[in-house]
Amino acid sequence: MSPYDIRDPSAQRAYMMANEAIVRACLESDVKVFASYPGSPTTEILDTFERICNDMDVRMDISANEKVALETAVGAAMVGCRSFCSMKSVGMNVASDALYVMAYTGVRSGCVVLLADDPHAHSSQSEQDGRWYGYNSYLPMLDPSDPQEAYEMVKFAYALSERYGTIVLLRTTTRINHQSAVVGTSEMRWTSFSKVNWKDNRRNYSAVGELARKGKMRLLETIGRIADDTRMTSFNRIEHFDGYALKKGGPGRSDGYTFGIATSGISYQYVLEALMRLKIKARILKIGMINPMPVALISGFLEGIDDLIVVEELSPYLETFIASAAQGSFSGLRIYGKRTGHLSEFSELDVPLVQRAIANVTGAEIPFDHLEHLKSMGSIADGIPMRPPVFCAGCPHRGTFTALRMALGDKGKVYLSNDIGCYTMLVLPPFSWSDSQLCMGSSLGIAAGVDLAAEEDVVSVIGDSTFFHAGLPGLVNAVHNGHDLTLLILDNSVTAMTGQQSHPGTEDAAGGRKGIKIDIEGALRGVGVSDITVIDPFQIRKSIGPMKEALKRSGVRAIISRGECALYHFRRYRRSGARTVPFFIDQEKCRKPYNCIKDFMCPAISLGPDRIPVISPHICVGCGECAQLCGFGSIRSTAVLKGGEDRVYYTPEDYGKLKEATTKSEEVER
Amino acid sequence: MKGAFNVLYCGVGGQGVVLMANIIGRACASEGIKVISGELHGLSQRSGSVHVHQRMGDDVRSPLIPYGECDVVLALEPIEALRYAYFLKRGGTVVTSTVVIHPPAETSMIVRGEKERYMEYEDVSSALVSSGMIVYGIDPLSIAMEAGEPQAENVVMVGALCALEGSPVSKKAVFSAVADSVPAKTKEVNLRAFDMGYLELSKRLRKL
């Protein structure tokens, strides 16, 4: 997050992340209600709203899932409050059931929904192309090319939304959301929140049968009117690159350009940089509103063009529409892109890939071949150790999975049905474990099918936030249908992966507001799970027995592993003034069996002199999980050196006592 | 500023890589220099490899530095400097911490006999130098501790970056950006760390 204070009402040019610029545009548009479930690359939108919601009087929910978030935002817009909702690509799959119908009913006040795709699947389970949601739902969709345009499009989207009484979709990609740049903002006129009177605004937002058909007719008419609305032209435009610089252009054969490029989103920037290097002339169609497509503008753009390359990420979305617009009228036109193999449907684009594709179409000479440079430099990092993300020092998951592996003896004995969260990293070394891991909540549905079909027992793994997000229907299904499975619930108190946000199982709600904590055991009992075991992940050895017992029984057995996320826990711990008490390895006693390293991979442990493991005191938080794996008792808390107890996790109170006991000796360093 | 000046910041999750780019970005904004940065969040934390692309100058549009066009790699950890060296142009500059953070996966390979020994700073610097890069290794951790706070090692590196030729942003603007970007109670320590990092690299540059 940038240091820019989004609450500053004055117009500024400040360095900020696109996600912050988007929130700023919402505030300038007087958005009063925001709802979201965290997910990369949109999470900073939620975090920024949470930071300012109390000061700016924005009503905000961190919702149980994306469908509920969308319904919350749209519900507010139906009664007359401007609202905003953001979600990652796969979140829209959850929310889309509601979206398609909301397109029919429309909204009263402005409602903008941001949908962020993640080409290259940097932090997602798929590379899905969300642009088709706009087309499929007949909702207008905007596709910004940089943080400034994202900011401007949000403001435009509210005007559009209210002019046509429709939800407007803003589609971004990771390279937009997580881009920082200098953004020029406008003055913010902020008004205080007040509830609207539904009685005076009452109208019917139902859709079924005849009502649905009426809604569909209205929707088709609306999207048609938006297509005719010429005010979209500032985002949809034709430009000329004259070999040196970018100029304003227009449709028509008379400009002498025969090579064209159609593009949108981040790809537009790659195109311009590639052209600056290749120094060739091109007529460029920059599409900012990708649904409805600007058909008339496309036709004008294609006049006089012999060769056209469509530059976009993921599927041939623009290419499909342009090819169909060209059919008949532009029979001599050659279109290059995904279908001709000049660009791939796989992963992201960048300047080198776009430069090569344009050079291949035009025959232009590449002044500096980045991809050749990459090849020649490829060997420089040969033999470099990989550094994949690992469970943090003090993470409860490492203890839980170590105990589970020990309880099973052989991890191949069960089908391990994993879910989405930090524990997804179970599939990486050191555990390299998971038979499947698909999408939010799927651990339980998949487990039902595996239970029907496979001889092996099934273990489902799900986090607390994911359990509330999409785990409950799968659990109800498993109980009702009498499935045999062990459900391992990792209750670390927060939505850890995305930055430790609150969720229905936490005491806090958004913005530090008091929430009602939904008790996991209560929820389990409520849907008929009576076999519940609670373990402490920091007591690995003590957890093995109860886990073994639960695994042997039949029916749906829940094991709740309860221990706070280390990042969350120690942030609060340190704020209270307490210092962590690290463990150390007794260099005399260590016999080097390396239990603390093999299959454990704590970032605090490395090899010291004579290959005896050492613990870095500035990384170790004193969780003591490793000490329980040592057969020689050579890993102990540094507290014992100061007259304290050899125990895991000092609380702030314990730390106070320890400090008192050692006032004569030096203070226990963190 | 005509053309482009490209910096790739890297390190290990938790070291404060993103803040380095934010400080320079803010300084650029104060001097009217066009700047764009590309970062990744999410899974890249958790002691994993982290990198941020930052580009300054009138001609920049892509948030990603094209391979072979990076002017400076500023690394809080040397193995990470080597990991992203393919972005550097021939004869590019690496300013890196000499303090290696051994990846847990590497430790695991060694005890399993799959690898002979750790990769050390000398391995990194010789690989970079033999590829024609100019390498400055400094110990920002010791400098930051001397300044009064080990966590300020990222600000030490930002100070070092300002000592390099070619950076379009002034030292004065970066100094103010540091002051505005860190928590009030650590401001003094961070400004000291910044000056010490600047001085450290200035001394090294004069020797050559």
Image (tube, coloured by chain):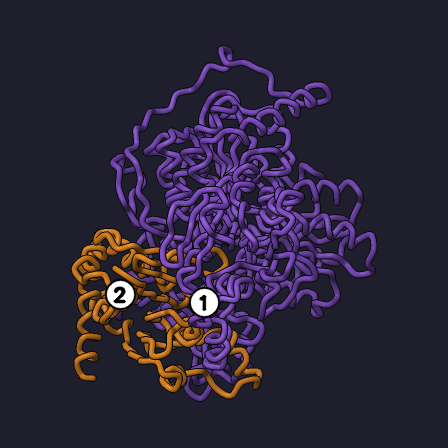
Chain colours: A purple, B orange
* Image x and y of residue A380, in percent: 45, 81
Q: What residue is drawn where x is 59% and y is 66%?
A: A428
Which numbered disc flags the more N-terminal residue, 2 or 1? 1
Tag 2 subunit? B
Q: Quadrant of residue A7?
A: top left
Q: Amino acid at mark 1?
A: Ser
Which SS class for mark 2?
helix
Relative placement, left or right, of B53 versus B168 is: right
- Mark 2, residues whose alpha carbon is within 10 Å: few (<14), some, or many (≥20)? many
Q: What residue is drawn where x is 31% and y is 75%?
A: B93
Against A174, residue A388 (above or below) is below
Foreground residue among B38 and A516? B38
* Image x and y of residue A272, in percent: 42, 56
Residue at image mark 1: B49
Residue at image mark 2: B158
The alpha-carbon separation of the residues under discs 2 and 1 comes to 19 Å
* Residue A72 circle label: none
Circles 2 and 1 on the same subunit = yes
Against A431, residue A516 (above or below) is above
Q: Quadrant of residue B142?
A: bottom left
Against A282, residue A9 (above or below) is above
Q: Amino acid at mark 2?
A: Val
Q: What residue is drawn where x is 71% and y is 58%?
A: A549
Foreground residue among A371 and A389? A371
Relative placement, left or right, of A175 versus B184 is: right
Which SS class for mark 1?
strand
* Image x and y of residue A550, in percent: 70, 55
Instruction: Check whether the beta carbons of the residues at disc 2 and disc 1 lie within 8 A of each other.
Output: no
Tag 1 subunit? B
Foreground residue among A475 and A141? A141
Against B196, residue A258 (above or below) is above
